[in-house]
Image (cartoon, rainbow, N blue to C red):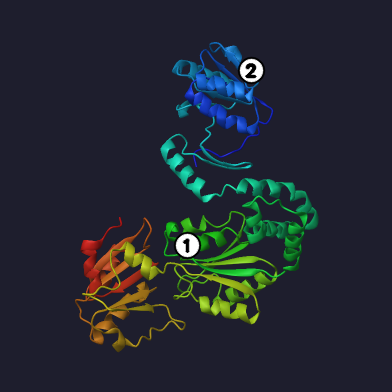
Amino acid sequence: MENFPIFINIDQKPVTIFGGGDIALRKAILLIKARPLLTVIAKDFSEEFKDFIDKNKIAFVQKSYEASDIRSQVLIVAATNDKRVNKSISNISQANRIPVNVVDQPDLCSFTMGSIVERDALVVSISSGGKAPVLARMIRQTLESLIPSHYSKLVNFAGSIRGLVKKRITHMEKRREFWEYFFEDTLIQKIANSKKKFRPQDIDALIKRRLKKVDGEVYLVGAGPGDKDLLTLRALQLMQKCDVCIYDNLVSSDVLEMVRRDADMIYAGKKRDQHTLEQSKINELLIELAMKGKRVLRLKGGDPFIFGRGGEEIEGLMKKNITFQVVPGISAANGVSSYSGIPLTHRDHAQSCLFLTGHFKEGIISFDWPKLIAEKQTVVIYMGLLSLQEMKKNLIKYGMSKNMPVAVVQSGTTQSQKVVIGQLRNISSKVNKARLKSPALIIIGTVVELRKDLNWFG
C-alpha cells in the first residue's frame, strides 16, 4: 500500500481551488458536498463555472495566482493550465503543511481524492495512487451498480439511532451484532427503499430480538483451492461477519487476508502428522466458542465436505443444538484440474471420476485397488504426495498400465502453481526431481494427455 486512505472533515473550514476551467469545476462540484468555506481563485472562469458559483453562492476572486493566496487553508486544489503555477502552489502548500492536490500531476500531490462513490454520509473512495485513474473509475462504476441508492436514507437513519442503540445494548460485541443484523433485516431494507419513514417501534422490535439471542453460530466455509478470486460470495460475506476464525494449513494467505480484520485468528494446523490442534480439540473448540455467543468461522481449503472432515465437525454441533451454516467451496479437484488444463471427464477419455485421499485415519493406505483399475476412468488423489511411490506400486501390481499418464500439481490455482507430467513408471522420480511439496493433487488417467492442448494458466 503506497498511500494510506484517510477521510478529512472540511465542514465550514477554508478550502481553496486555483483554476477556473472544467477540471476545476469538477473538483468544486465534488468538494461542496462536504460543506467547506470554499474560495475559487482564477484569472478567467468558464461560463459554466460562473453559473455554478452564482447558484451555490461560492466565494471567488478573479485574478492571477499569488504566493500570498496560500495562508491557513485546510485543503488546496491546484487545477490551473500552467504547470509552473501548479508546481509553485504545491511547493508553498507543502512548506506550510497544507494538504494539496494538483490535478493530473501525482508527483506534486500530498493527497489524492480517488474515484468516489457517495451515498450521503456513506462514502467509498478508490485510488490507484495516480498510476491507473481509468481503472479506479471502472471500479467505481462497478460499485455504483452494487450499492443501492436507498443506502443514503439507511445510513442517515442509522446515525440518528446510534445513541439509543448504545444505551439499550451496552455490550460492545452485542452492539456490533445488532448493527449487522440491522443492515441485513428485510423490513429495514424495505422501509429504506420506499417513501415510508422509520418508526421507533421498528427499532425496538429489532433490539428486543437481538437481546434475546444468546447463542453463537458456526460457519463451516469452503475456502476454495487457493486463489482468493474463487471464493463464493456467501463465503466472503461470512468471513467478514465472524468473531473468530479457525483455519487450516490448506487455506492460502491471500484468502486469510479477506477475513474480518479484528477477528481472532486460530491456526488449526492440519499438516500431515503435524496437527496444531487435534480434530477432537477443534470439535470441542467450535462448541465452546459458539456457546459463548461467538460467530465462529471454520475455514477449510477446498470444500468442507470433500475430505475436509466437515461431517465430523457438525455432528458435535448438532448434538448441542448449535446453529450452523455450511458453505460449499470449489473443491481442489475441480479448481486444480481446471487451472492445469486437465478436464476430469471427457467423452473420449473418462466417463467416471474417483476422488480418493492419501491421508488415512490410521496412517495406512487401504484402497480397494482392483476397483481403481478401470477403463475410461480418472482417479484424483488428495494429500497423496508422501504416499505416491507406494500407490504407484500397487496400481501397477493390480493391473494399471505403467504408461498411464499422471499429473501432480502443487499449489494449484495460485501463481505458485507447478505441474509435473509423467507416467506411472516414472512419476515418482520426476516429482522428486522437481522437488514438489504439499499441498499437491495427483490426477491419474488419459485425460492428463489433454493438457498439452488445453493448458491455459501460467
Is residue 412 visible in the rendered structure shown here? yes
Q: Is residue 296 above or below residue 371?
A: above
Other residues around mark 1 within 10 Å, as few (<14) / some (14–19) / many (≥20): some
Q: In which quarter of the image is residue 61?
A: top right
124 and 218: which is toward the camera: 124
Describe the element under mark 1 as helix, strand or loop. loop
- Residue that mark 2 sits on: 71
Q: Name the residue under label 1.
A: 232
Residue at the (74%, 50%) spot, across then down: 162
Q: Is residue 244 left or right of residue 409?
A: right
**Res. 94 visible in picture:** no
Residue 22 x %, y %: 48, 24
Mark 2, Cα crowd under 10 Å, few <14 / some 14-19 / many 20+, is few
**Quadrant holding the C terminus:** bottom left
Q: Is mark 2 on a helix, strand or loop?
A: loop
Report the mark closest to the observer, 2 or 1. Answer: 1
136 is higher (above) or lower (below) than 265: above
In the image, what residue type sits under mark 2?
Arg
